[in-house]
Image: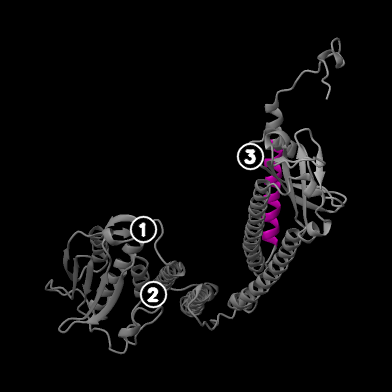
Amino acid sequence: MSQQHPDDFPSYAGRPQRPQQPAQPVAKSNGNRVAATAARTQSWWNETLHKLSLHARVTLLAAVAVGLAVAIVSVAAYITVRQQMYQNLDNSLTQRAVQAAQKGVLTDLTVLQTVPSDALGLSDIRVGVISAEGQQFGARSSLLPPMGDDELQVARDQGNEASLRTVGVRNGGSHFRVIAVPARYCPAGLSRDCSEDPQTYLQPGALVVAQSLGSIDETLHNLGVVLWAFGLIGVIGAALAGNAVARSGLRPLARLTGAAEHVARTEDLKPIPVGGTDEISRLAMAFNAMLGALAQSRDRQRRLVGDAGHELRTPLTSVRTNLDLLAQADKRGGLRPEDRQQLLDDVRAQMDELTTLIGDLTELARDTPQVRNAELIELSNVVEDAVMKVRRRAPGLEWDVQITPFPVWGDERLLGRAVTNLLDNAAKYSTPEDAEQRSDGQPIGHVTVRLLDGVLTVTDSGPGIAEADLPHVFERFYRSSEARSRPGSGLGLAIVKHAAEQHGGMIYARNVPGAGAQFTLWLPHAATQTR
């Protein structure tokens, strides 16, 4: 092969050279495009998933998971079988080629050319010899094995290295696995036996053996078809199984969704039946608990509205009647000054009662589960302030007060009102209805207040609470038959219970032998409260 001199190539001297661009910006630009494409693909995938229902997502997830598993197993099995078949074929070809080269039967061209083609065709093998000069020899009436530079290099080197490669044959539509081992061949047409003088007659070359890969290709093709078929069947089966699992697993969720839609449409807060202990069953139980809380809140609101309307009707009717009497009297010339003053005092008292009732209703309407914006307060200061306030309103009573410090987290205004209501209630029932200040200076009633370790007890000297009324004293607008003749809205003790529950405490009432009623309010210490 002739070599070209550098001067034989066309000269580019004098032509403008195009400036070479650095490779880094191009690589960076390609990286940006790949990143942008990946981001768009991920965005599209997320948007597509969000549009799918949960049922479709579970089905798709099952199909994709099984599909990936089948694909990995199929690829691994295909590669393993292919490598093993090629390895077995290579070992067999190498062993046979080395043995044939050592025995020298097939390297004797006279013998090789007399081998019938049918003998090689039965084993689908092609045998040939290539000399160091590139001459190719094979069996008579038989195709030569593919030979090229690799086989020629083995023939020239005469070392211990063999060449092994896969060669495609276009006209045959198949390809071969070709091995070439170094060998010394005996030319054809010699009058003497090459074995008599091997150094003189044997020529350097290579024995080339080619094995058709048609059977292996067919086996691998059939294996690929089987793997694809079973993989497709597995994906379809996984999708059907995922669909069935999603349908059965999401059926309680569908019932829960239907129940929520029914509640939103009809405002019927009836709980739904729950069976099982899985996550969806827990969700259904939480939904039922929410419905129960909502139903209780709605019932409390309805009772509050109904009771408020009933309680507001009495003072409003009284105020309207008094105002009508005042207007009619003015038309007839007016009332006497003392009657007019008595009527105005009555109106003012009714307005005060109405104001108190509206304030109590506003406080109870705040149906919150816990105190917001809680702060650290000293309960003893709250009790002391309430005692001073109520003592001024009830000067004829004797107060026995014993207070110890106790910090709590809570709303100082709400706690102050609750404690004041307890003291007002004790003062009201410790004072007889016809009581007047005794001339000898002795008290007309007695109230005992104790605050020890967060437990506030208020004991009056009244007649006590009837056993039938004890379970109802903290209900809204509940007033016993003995209390109906006394002023009040019937909400004071309800506010006390409301405040205790909001602060994580409790309130209860009982009768004390030899005294009157006793109310006990317990609140947790600040160190144990959650803010």
Disc 2: which residue: 491
Residue 217 in the image, given as x and y percentages of width and height? 75, 58
Ranked by sequence position, the earlier of labels 2 and 1 is 2
Residue with the mark numbered 1: 531
The amino acid at mark 2 is Leu
Q: Position of residue 19 (x, y in %)?
A: 77, 18
- Tell us which disc is closer to us: 3 or 2: 3
Position of residue 442 in the picture relative to residue 407 (left or right): left
Using the image, determine if residue 263 lies above or below residue 112: below
Location of residue 227 with respect to 293 vertically, above or below: above
Mark 1 residue type: Arg
Q: Secondary structure at mark 3?
A: loop
Real-space CA distance between mark 1 and mark 3, rounded to the nearest whole angstrom: 84 Å
Q: Residue furthest top?
A: 14
Residue at the extreme left of the image, as rendered: 440
Image quadrant where one finds the C terminus: bottom left
Q: Which residue corresponds to the image point at 24% horizontal and 81% vertical from the top-left?
A: 510
Whether residue 41 appears in magenta in the rendering, the answer is yes
Judged by depth in the image, the label closer to the viewer, 1 or 3, is: 3
Q: Is residue 488 magenta?
A: no
Nearer-the-camera pick, 162 or 371: 162
Nearest the viewer among 54 and 178 is: 178
Q: Quadrant of residue 193?
A: top right
Magenta portion: prevailing SS class: helix
Span of residues in magenta: 31-51
Name which of mark 3 and mark 2 comes first in the sequence.
Answer: 3
SS class of the residue under badge 1?
Answer: loop
Whether residue 317 is visible to the viewer of this picture, yes or no, is no
Residue 273 visible (yes or no) = yes
